Amino acid sequence: MAKTPSYICQSCGAAHSKWSGRCDACGAWNSIVEEVPLSSGPAAKSLGTKRGKGMVLNDLAGSETPPPRETSGIAELDRVLGGGLVPASAILVGGDPGIGKSTLLLQAAASFARSGVSCIYVSGEEATAQVRMRAGRLGLSDAPVRLAAETNLRNILTTLEKEKPDLAIIDSIQTMWADNVDSAPGSVSQVRAAAHELTTFAKRHGIAVVLVGHVTKEGQIAGPRVVEHMVDTVLYFEGERGHPYRILRAVKNRFGPADEIGVFEMTGSGLAEVSNPSALFLGEHETPQPGMAVFAGIEGSRPVLCEIQALVAPTPHSQPRRSTVGWDGGRLAMILAVLESRCAIPFSGLDVYLNVAGGLRVREPAADLAVAAALLSAREDVALPPKTVIFGEISLSGALRPAAQAENRLKEAAKLGFSSAIAPTQSRSLKIEGMAVRPFPDLAALVGDIFGAG
Ligand code: TYD
Ligand code: MG
């Protein structure tokens, strides 16, 4: 039999028989740590020939009623959950340290508890006194949430089984420690074991479980992706530290639409809901400045307009800088390449900085055209036309592809006082009152028309 592997990649969970600097399976560096793998011991032996129990097989048709949902009363949270909390479901809430996960979940716990959902909040990171102090500051002390500071999974499960709450919040999964696994808390084996125990416990006992997970600097929930597969719903809580706005984003939801967002503002007394975020990420400028473009975006089911800012400056270095905040670096490189090879506008020798205002992270490809326009505007030092929104996906050929929900984008822009839109040709037929659509077939046409270059 091969030697038992005991070196586990903390990024992908692959097992190796010896330590190395780079994981062959996923290519991550310095991610391999010695652990006692889950699969050692009797459980690792093959199932052998011993027969199991027969399964009950069912038909697809049946009269299942949709799951009943509990609402928290925090509308932004309920919407992201797909209309409320589904009993016996497992939810993972990920986010950078310090972004406000504990604050959000304490507020959610209090809100659920006040509306009659019995709730236990287990903190593995803070002492009871600390959580109490926070609750006091948030004005939640009177909410009937029950609180514990504990990291031992066995103790937690025993208590939950006895108390039978409707909802248990585990803050965080990285601090949990299952005594049947020999590695340190926070390691892949521990995180995986704890998540597995808690999710199966949720199903078996009909208790909804929320797991808080920290995100690594690469932007993934620390520990293997496998935790994301185990739970029913994965929410990311994101935002920039220096900005007050926070976005709760559903990236996976077995009980509702994925990609829905909830918007919050971090205030001195906790997170406040922002129920109409469409104008939140617009800048202050009345007249447009060079390097600034307004993207008419859609986040989940809602239109959100945001300002995209670009700065282009001659570089003193041989390797120019490309720096992005709120936008994918790979996608920026692609747009620069299209501008260079399809429109003959070179960016070599120029540092490029791209920023999405207000700490929003834009993931829609429909923002390509707004990014390109901001880059061009910055490079040519020419402001874009005033009161204009931009959207459209750029393909590698330089052609513009239509964006989903164009009508909604335009309607919201018109509502916020914009009067024209730069969009792909396909949006030509849309008639929105007060909104003139300027259709373009490709990026080169836009360059020629707006900047008189080409
Ligand atoms: P926290 O919920 O502890 O973050 P996480 O659990 O994701 O690590 O949030 C910590 C930050 O939130 C901290 O920097 C202070 C800020 N904060 C406020 O601005 N107002 C508040 O009312 C609270 C409770 C926190
Ligand atoms: Mg916390």
Image: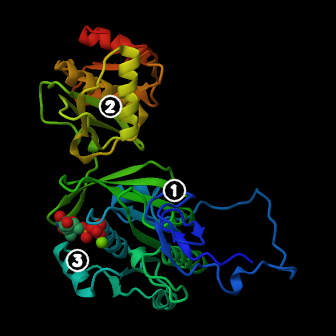
Instruction: Name the amino acid, label 1.
Output: Asn
Tell me the number on the disc at residue 151. Answer: none
Q: Residue at x 53, y 73 (%)?
A: 192
The reply to whether residue 439 is visible in this rendering is no
Pinpoint residue 178: horizontal percent, then vertical percent. Answer: 50, 85
Q: Residue at x 28, y 53 (%)?
A: 239
- On screen, residue 332 versus residue 382, left or right, reads right
Q: Nearer the viewer, mark 3 or mark 2?
A: 2
For the C terminus, the image quarter is top left
Q: Residue at x 37, y 13 (%)?
A: 444
For the N terminus, the image quarter is bottom right
Instruction: Name the amino acid, label 2.
Output: Ala
In space, the residues marked 2 and 1 are separated at their CA atoms by: 25 Å
N-terminal-most mark, 1 or 3: 3
Residue at label 3?
135
Tell me the number on the disc at residue 296. Answer: 2
Say if mark 2 contacts mark 1, CB within 8 Å. no
Q: Residues within 10 Å of mark 2 (few under 14, many from 20)?
A: many
Pinpoint residue 24: horizontal percent, then vertical percent. Answer: 56, 58
Q: Give SS at disc 2.
A: strand
Tell me the number on the disc at residue 253. Answer: 1
Pinpoint residue 123: horizontal percent, then vertical percent. Answer: 34, 81
N-terminal-most mark, 2 or 1: 1
- On screen, residue 47 versus residue 333, left or right, reads right
